[in-house]
Image (spheres, grey):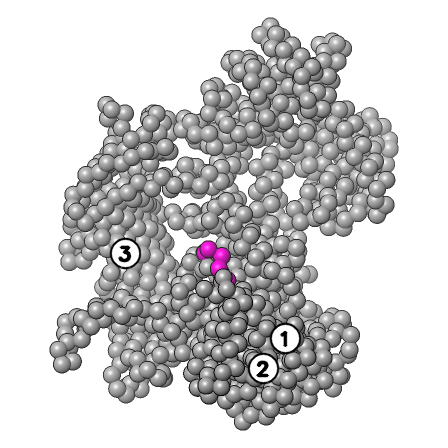
Amino acid sequence: MPYLGGEETVRELRRALSNPNVQSDQLRYRNTILKVIRAMSQGVDMSGLFSEMVKACATVDVVQKKLVYVFLCSYAALNPELSLLVINTLRKDCQDPNPMVRSLALRNMTNLRLPSLVEYVEQPLAAGLRDRAACVRRVAVLGWAKLHNLQASSEIDAAVVNELYSLLRDPDPVVMVNCLRALEEILKDEGGVAINKPITHHLLNRLKECDIWGQCQVLRVLQRYRPQSEDELFDILSLLDASLVSPHPPIMAATLSLFLSLCSGQPAVSLAALERVRGPLLAACGSGSREMRFTALCHIQLLLRSIPGLMGAHYKRFFCGYAEPAYIKQRKMQVLVELVNDENVAMLLDELKGYCTDVNAETAQAAITAIGRIGRSYSDRCLEILTGLLGLKQDHITSAVVQTMRDLVWVCPQCSDTVCFALEGCEETLQDSQGRQALLWLLGVYGERVSSAPYTLEVFIDGVRSEASLGVKMELLTATMRLFLCRPAETQDMLGRLLHYCIEEETDMCVRDQALLYYRLLHCGIEETRKVLQGRRSDPSLGVLIGRPAEPVSQWARSFNTLEPLRQGSIETESVSRGSPEHTMFDPKPNADLSNTLDCSRIEKVHSGKEDFVWMEECVRCPTIPRCSPQSLQAAMQLVNIQTLAFTPPQTLPWRVYLYTHTCLDDAPHSTLILGELLYTGEEPQKAEVHKDDKALKGFLSILTTVLHTLSSERA
Amino acid sequence: MISQIFILSSKGDHLIYKDFRGESGGDAVGVFYEKVTALTGDQPPVVMSHKGLHFVHVRQGGLYWVATTTADSSPFTIIEFLNRLSALVKDYCGSLSEKSVQMNFALIYELLDEAVDYGYIQTTSSDVLKNFIQTEAVSSRPFSLFDLSNVGLFGAETQQSKVAPSSAATRPIQSSREQGGKSEIFVDVIERMSVVIGSNGMLMKADVEGEIRVKCYLPNCSEMRIGLNEEFSIGKSQLRGYGAAVRVDEVSFHQMVRLDEFDSHRILRLCPSQGEQMVMQYQLSDDLPSAPPFRLFPTIERDSGGRLLMYLKLRCDLPPKSAAINVAATIPVPKGSLSLSQELSSPDQSAELKPQSRAVVWKIPRFTGGMQLSALFKLEVPGLSSASLLEVGPVGLSFELPKLTATGLQIRFLRLSPVQPGPSQRWVRFINITDLNIFTERSFS
């Protein structure tokens, strides 16, 4: 049991290792060393055996040597003095007639990672570069990179760098590729290895000799090259065409990356390249390895951002397999939503319908959300499916359906009749707070059309004492207020009870404040209340906003073939399922005054605490903004999580809007606050921002621009 | 660029850990396992990040194969490499399991050492690696009497010895060198078919993904020629020969395959290296040359006692000489189903209610062509409503068809040159793994 008696094992192994009988029997010696390594990889601390292992290193048995080196490299940092003893053996091995022993010694010499040994290593490394065996040269070349990183302060001799450059012409392709890798690391401060025309052409000509890993490396380094003429560019592109449709996904992806960076000035060529990789990418989507399938799917999503119709005819490839893991199914659904068109919508919805009853609740919810997204363009068919799903009376399905319906009604008000009809009776199956919030919102906004609305609310109000969710309480308040406005006779009594409870007994300040606000609002008279509470019920123009326009390739070209696309999606889906801010917990939108006072305090806090903010100005060409009503601008902004603070009255010049938003990146330690001023002086509108995060600002600007463009095209 | 590589068992035991660059200190393995176990499902996302550490992992043989890397490295490359690494380990150790990795850790360290240097992939070709790998594999296969059944009296060839045992190809490649292992070559034609059949019996979707794999135990083999059916055609327009055409949509080949005789005679020429490699991949979607091999006739109703009755009839439309094996039908049942009583038509079948996956699994070990089997399942479902009936289905069927391919692809011949000295054996195997989805009668209304 090596797990338990760690010390006992060490003692026993030490005895065995220093036993001369064991040492003389090669097989027993090797087996003892094996035991040491086994214990080491199981996590037992074996560093106490270092000196015994150093002795074991001097042997002719290559297997034993390799095992000892595994040990030494793991523990060398703990025993720098004792490691000096190994160096002699290693240096001797570097003279061995067997090239395998030479490369082994050289590699482990550099793997010890001890700055104190550098002076002993340089000479064998230099000799290694000129070794006649390719496997030694491979190791020696990378050894220089290791050496450089070990003591980054000291400069590597210029002669070595020159020698590495000349080894780019080495007959062995792996040596050539390793030279590229080593030079990239050594010359990192100068921007990496110099990629000029002769080197580029040399690398391109030898590309075919490399294996797939080498090819990927070369293609990656070449991304820095800028062809001098258009003819040269097209020569390179035609040379690489075969790699673009390579059956190996790594080569295909690396080649496409190179294409996109070479053709950054020629969008038409990039788009043609995307069409060309469709086949190989689809093949990777059907790969036997599910991780590879997932990677290909994520990259297809990137491509679809620029050419939405790219995969339209191949939608069946994205149908989910019965046994596929949930993360692949959810990605496939995201792709399917993008591919929908008049011809395939029936098939697609049929397929998605099948996923709604998936065993995995998250997959089922994703399928329902996907149907809701398609509902924005094909509302009748989708609503039929959604109402059918309510019949299953399962809590997670009902919750997802009600949330989806809420989102759908906000964009497509024409669906409201069907939705109102379907809502009857589903409060019994709803369990989670998200679903109940959605139901309450719908009851508040469309209360006059749902005959049972007051009774449903009454059940909620009777149970408000045991309600745990803050969001549900807030939503309940607003919904009851709204229902009171259209059906006062039935609601008056329960509204009174609710307000009384919230003001007198509720401990949460948010709920109490909200209730107080409504109470005082009611004192101002019914007309005033109506003005504040009855905002918009829907915004059809947002349907256009959500159907993403084709983005230029350059928007995502940098993240292609990195880990970025594989991580992104999960965050994206989250924000989709959270819905628009109209429906989120802290935002009873129409009473803007309240939420603003609430948030202004936070802004000031940020200012006083941290002074690192940046100013910038940006001009956007959006001619007709000021003519749109403040409400629609506000609603549009809120849908993309931008809140409006204040407006100047319409038709005044200069016209101003003040905006703010928070970034909510998962990996950022704290969120960034962006404050914006939208300024229209008469000729062209301008924006000026205060912020402190470059990436966040860029995202903000692009979103804002999209909103402005959509709104202005609505008006036009 | 790869910083570290480690292999974890599904329970989180450290099997292999190698740090190539010594940059990211700390307990990466622990962090990774924590992240995996913190997730609800058993399917963690392929990429996970934690404070500048980026984990990319694949699952093979029930193990986590994890690489830590930088954010800008290519996921395609790393995933392909991890898959390739697991394939190498499988080649060298014979099979892929926690036990075989544990027993052969020295060999795997040696492999990793040669395959990756300073985080850069050097080579994964087994031809190159075999010159460097010195450690012998330890095979974990226990002695079995079945191994002896292939040997006839006094070495005479028996009927049995014409069929290789299914475990024949799961042995380490290295042992062929010294231990006098048999020089054998296996050519596997593997087709994965996924079919969806609508409630009216119409074929809704059919996809076949096929591959030809060569697993080579020959110490030196200069060239090998594989002849496919002559009427094999690619794409829709092309038709060859007069017989029933064997058609696929797309084909891709391994880069070492020479195709100079492919256009005229459908012959692939290659020099296989030791170990397993994919020679050819092909795809076919939608029009299958033959009808799907099974038909299902379901009847679902509620009996007077509030139980759910499912009467399933399954017919196998294969020719009578062939059979499907390991047939498993998965029938999703309503949530909260409590107990199952069953009436099956023969004793070797079995059925089981799996509450966590909410399904009844009906297993039939062998299903001969032309047969018809039926089963009656009675389910106890508290609070059964007419809506619960909607949750039944679609039925998933998975099975293997030995010696049959859905596309009709055949291997005409397999020739090795030069003629191998001593006895060498050539095996051709066809494996068809199918995932069939049959929608039962269901409509939302």
Position of residue B409 in the picture relative to residue A36 (left or right)? left
Q: Secondary structure at mark 3?
A: strand
The residue located at (63%, 11%) in the rendering is A497
The residue located at (58%, 41%) in the rendering is A574
Subunit of label 3: B
Distance from label 1 to label 2 (Cα)?
A: 10 Å
Look at mark 3 in the image and give the residue it sits on. Answer: B400
In the image, what residue type sits under mark 1? Ala
In the image, what residue type sits under mark 3? Glu
The quarter holding residue A168 reads bottom right
Give me the disc on residue A54.
2
Mark 2 or mark 1, which is nearer the start of the sequence? 2
Q: Secondary structure at mark 2?
A: helix
B275 is within the stretch colored magenta: no
Look at mark 1 in the image and give the residue it sits on. Answer: A76
Q: Secondary structure at mark 1?
A: helix
In the image, what residue type sits under mark 2? Val
Disc 2 packing (10 Å; few <14; some 14–19; many ≥20): many
Image coordinates for residue B163, horizontal then vertical, percent: 21, 70
Pick out the residue farthest to the top.
A489
Callout in the foreground (1, 2): 2
Image coordinates for residue B386, horizontal then vertical, percent: 33, 25
The residue located at (80%, 29%) in the rendering is A646
Q: Which residues are magenta?
A: B10-16
